[in-house]
Amino acid sequence: MTEVRWLDAREQMIWRGFLGATGSFMEHLDRQMQRDSGMPLAYFEILAVLSEMPGRSLRMSELAAMCRSSRSRLSHAVSRLEEAGWVRRRACESDKRGQFAELTDEGFKVLEKAAPGHVTAVREHLFDVLTPEQLEQLDQITAAIQAGLTPQCDKAKVELQAEY
């Protein structure tokens, strides 16, 4: 077993700042979405992802991966979106166990109505508070973090697929 590389005081401060900033930002976006559109940010994300897919449809397992959600959590969310008439499920013809989630016309209208407030909140609390240089740095930093996580995430996806 390798020795733990504990965070020093500066790293601890940076880590906690990162957690605080990202947590506050996501909480703010969720509150804005709830207040202005009556839905959690997670539901908005599902609608947005579906809106960008060919036929506004995506296999449930792929939708879960794109939304960084467990299959059970996504299934619950899609059930709520179905109740609202914003999404419908349909069977996968090639795999009887699989299902597709499809954005309805009503769901697309809800998304169109919710999107301006969301974009405004993102712009005001991310893009407008950073300089162009900081935005470039943020882009590089997030790409580096994602690149560092990709091998582990890909491995976990393969393991999860083997379970189902």
Image: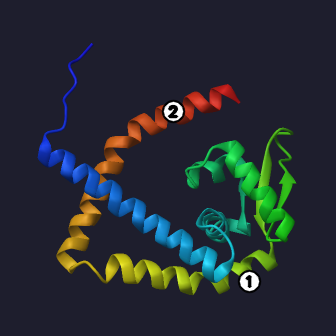
Q: How many marks?
A: 2
Circle 1: element type: helix
Q: Quadrant of residue 95?
A: top right
Label 1 is placed on what type of residue?
Answer: Lys
**Residue 155 location (% of width, % of height):** 48, 31
**Could you tell me which quadrant the C terminus lies in?**
top right
Using a 10 Å C-alpha cutoff, classify the residue at mark 2 as few (fewer than 14 neighbours), some (14 to 19) or many (20 or more): few
Residue drawn at the location 59% of the way across and 67% of the way down: 41
Q: Is residue 11 left or right of residue 22?
A: left
**Residue 62 location (% of width, % of height):** 64, 49
Which residue lies under the disc numbered 1? 109
Residue drawn at the location 47% of the way across and 71% of the way down: 28
45 or 11, nearer to the observer: 11
Cα separation between marks 2 and 1? 35 Å
145 or 99, nearer to the observer: 145
Circle 2: element type: helix
121 shown above or below 81 = below
118 or 16, nearer to the observer: 16
Tell which residue pokes out farthest to the top in this image: 1
**Residue 2 location (% of width, % of height):** 23, 17
Which residue lies under the disc numbered 2? 156
Label 2 is placed on what type of residue?
Answer: Ala
Q: Is residue 93 left or right of residue 27?
A: right
Q: Quadrant of residue 34?
A: bottom right
Question: What label does residue 20 carry, if any?
Answer: none
19 shown above or below 134 = above
Residue drawn at the location 64% of the way across and 26% of the way down: 162
**Residue 59 location (% of width, % of height):** 72, 51
Mark 2 or 1, nearer chain start: 1
The answer to whether marks 2 and 1 mark residues whose Cβ atoms lie closer than 8 Å is no
Residue drawn at the location 19% of the way across and 32% of the way down: 6
Q: Is residue 24 left or right of residue 11?
A: right
